[in-house]
Image: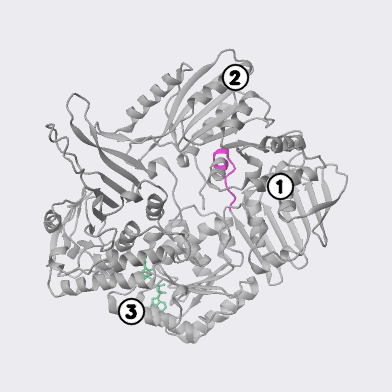
Amino acid sequence: MTSPTRNPLRAGLHMPRTPDPCALVVFGATGDLTARKLVPALYNLARERLLPMGFSVVGFARRDWSDEQFRAAMKDGVSKFSREPLQDEIWESFARDLHYVSSDFADPAGYRRLGERLTKQDQAHGAGGNRLFYLATQPTAYAEIAQNLKEAELSRVADGSWTRLVVEKPFGRDLESARKLDRSLGAVFRERQIFRIDHYLGKETVQNIIVFRFGNGIFEPIWNRRYVDNVQVSVGETVGVEGRGGYYEESGALRDMVQNHLMQVLALVAMEPVASFTGDAVRDEKAKVFHAIMPIEDIAGSTVRAQYTAGAVLGEQVPGYRQEPGVAPDSRIETYVALKLTVENWRWAGVPFYLRVGKRLPKRATEVAITFKTPPLQLFRQMGSEGPTPNLLVLRIQPDEGISLRFGAKVPGTRSDVRPVNMDFRYGTSFGVEPPEAYERLLLDAMLGDSTLFTRWDGVEAAWELLTPVLDAWASGVSPLRFYEAGSWGPDEARTLMERDGREWHRM
Amino acid sequence: MAPDVAAGIERLDDRAIAVDPGAIEGEFTKIWRATSGAASDESSIRLRVLNFVAFAYEAAGANRFREVMRALPQRYPCRGILAVAAPGQRQLDASIAAGFWRSSGGARHICSEEVQLVGGAAQEPELASAVLALLVPELPVVAWLMDAPDFGGRMSREILETADRAFFDTAGQVDTAAVFGHVLRAGAGREVELCDFAWGRIATWRELVAQFFDGDEGLRQLSKIQSIEIDGGGARLSSESLLLAGWLVSRLGLSLAYLAPSGGRIEATLYDGTRGVTLKVARGADGGAAPVREVRIRTGTALLSVGIHPESGHMHVREQREGGLSRRTVASPRGDDASAIAAALDDRADPTIYAEALGSALALLAAPAPDA
Ligand SMILES: NC(=O)c1ccc[n+]([C@@H]2O[C@H](COP(=O)([O-])OP(=O)(O)OC[C@H]3O[C@@H](n4cnc5c(N)ncnc54)[C@H](OP(=O)(O)O)[C@@H]3O)[C@@H](O)[C@H]2O)c1
């Protein structure tokens, strides 16, 4: 028997392959993200047999922890945050391969120690020199870490192995800083080695937008300017800044949500069909959408920014943004954004895309609402009945994931009264199974080298190109900061934005 | 990354009803309407993604069916139809029920419609016709033959003709070789996809064995395999350990060169075109419940061992390669009927792989392959 080129035992199995043996190095391993998301996701992958033999984790952070202390902290994280409960036997087996290196990001000696650790593990496990570096720390440290990796020769790719870098959001705080960061990372890693996380893309229901559009034959033919009147992407949060006031003061809703998550959802809704789901196909199509979005010329007329004041949400009194811990009493950071975009391509010319996101709104919901044009003939009005309401298709992303379609139906009786009815399909209550956490999918994909669900530099850059002028204009006083009471649907000006176009926000 | 399904569905009480498809459909419409909670100007979708038809010769089959209907519709909202041809029964009775979920707001969401039909042994034709009339049109039909899969009765034949997938269990039968033969014959020339629970039970074993041979280094080991040993539990050679052996033999393209006379175990020499590979399939000395307890594969330079912990059910993997020793413990999926069915439905199975494994297993039992 000569060595085959494919594993014949894989045929017909659930997974086409597991990732190559590799080491995951987490920079910022003592932080919140590692304990809350990353290690619980890895534990679940390990328990479901999705991690390769010879997989190990090396945590890297400043705190003076031993391997044992790191394991204990991670065990605590898994007990609290894992989707599946912690089982000791599986934990013990997983934890054997958790290691820790204590060092400041600036200290070259730390990277040398890291290198020694990795070499030792490669020898013990036959991990073959494959490395996934995960930047789970403040973005100001990204460039320094990348540079130090290079100097310690840890970014060098040995023959037949791979090295990848996973970067958390935010990627820059405006166009210039994003470009600078891209240049720093680009000096060490190639674009195809860089995996930028947008955890929205790891959500099943966001991926469902693609399935819904391209897995069904009936929607694509009407998914265009001929039939669609407008598209609304809305994210409502009931929470405030949840103790992260300091972080939020540096970002605001436009940077925190619109530049990344909302733009990504918009691109999935607006993009052209893809020929495959591999490699860059989806990202190529998304990039075309980003480039077709027109710069916002009338920033005062097309954008609204606002901040919540004290009020009541879900039956509880809550303080205003300026009273939150870590927030300046005269802060001008926006917690709400509404804006109008146009996508000037063959499919969407003339169809406005409205985006809105806000904290302390009455309801937690993320959804895309597509309003169709009303039928050309007001047939039933002539017969004395009310005119038809436009068809509305809502893709709900969270919570209560699902799809609803509003259409007109005749009211029983002799008159031709048309009444809007909603047909409602909910994944949550129909398929009552918890989907895996976004980070499980994203970590696995990064190990497999599949970058489909990660953002690419051209998309990130295009989003910043579009939104940096908005940030600049706001900073110079264009479109003044408005206020809305916590528990309301946002400022009046957001409603006016729609009314000027003869439209209204879809009720979430 | 398919999660296991867990029972979480509440059930509306059974209501007796005439064996009349029109009346049964009418009753379901009422149930949907009453539980949808929709305002008068809203309609709700009846979400059903498949017909799930179970057939048993024992009244006890009803309990297993209900257990499945308490969990499967979480992932596969469906119409479930149970047909029982029980020896003592004289007339044909029907009852219906529905399963629902409660969302966080307390609203009830129907996720299953259930029909139970119980008739006498002589009433198989009537049962079969009632089942056909109750299938939701256009939806796939997934069938479950709860008893020995001999595919001889009227209902089984009907199922093979109608169903898209048919579940059954080759494990626990007195004459495994005969059962394997029935299954091979039943599948030949038919569209239906045959889903053996015993095959599903070794999915994790197959996955963990396959992982060992991933990557360049793993592929090199394939051509160096020297011996395969499979230990099973139970009173006789389990269907699962035979299928696992058959799978390895067929996927690795091995042919049978020598088969030692059995006696509750298999010892064979296989040939890969250039070298011999020894295969031993045995029943563990201390019995134990797990149908497969350990698999060991030795190559010239490496050793893989996969075993199951008798109490926790976790699986232990040990790999000894030139690079060193690696060990890990992973969870094995739940073994209940609903999880097994859901897992098989989730997978894009390749039925030829099962059929080839079955054929090789039959050869290892020194049984003649049935004529196609
Ligand atoms: N937390 C979340 O849920 C979440 C969600 C989405 C995105 N993110 C993003 O993920 C990243 C990490 O967030 P986080 O919440 O985990 O932050 P965090 O809790 O503040 O953790 C920061 C980590 O970086 C380490 N660190 C900071 N400066 C260091 C230095 N000079 N040398 C060595 N280690 C240093 C800290 O180590 P010591 O404490 O030991 O000094 C700590 O492990 C951020 O980019 C954030 O935007 C977080």
Task: Residue under label 3, please give it.
Answer: A179
Q: In percent of the image, x 63 and y 16: which residue is there? A: B122
Could you tell me which secondary element the residue under label 1 belongs to? helix
Could you tell me residue B82's position as x and y percent? 54, 27
Q: Where on the picture, by quarter, is residue B192?
A: top right
Q: Ligand 1 near label 1 (Cβ, under 8 Å)?
A: no
Q: Is residue A44 left or right of residue A52?
A: left
Could you tell me which secondary element the residue under label 3 belongs to? helix
Which quarter is ligand 1 in? bottom left
Q: Is residue B110 left or right of residue B310?
A: left
N-terminal label among 2 and 1: 2
Residue A183 appearing in the image: yes
On whether disc 1 and disc 3 are found on a single subunit, the reply is: no
A443 is higher (above) or lower (below) than A412 = below
* Magenta residue check for B336: yes
Q: Where on the picture, by quarter, is residue A478?
A: bottom left
- Considering the whole magenta stretch, tell me its main secondary structure: loop
Q: Chain of mark 2?
A: B
Could you tell me residue B334's position as x and y percent? 57, 45
Q: Which residues are magenta?
A: B331-340
Task: Residue under label 1, please give it.
Answer: B357
Could you tell me residue B85's position as x and y percent? 61, 21
Q: Is residue A435 left or right of residue B127?
A: left
Work out how far the residue at label 1 is from the one at label 3, CA to CA, in angstroms: 56 Å
Task: Residue under label 2, please give it.
Answer: B125
- Asked if the residues shown at circle 2 and circle 1 are in contact, with their CB atoms under 8 angstroms apart, the answer is no
- Count the numbered circles shown: 3
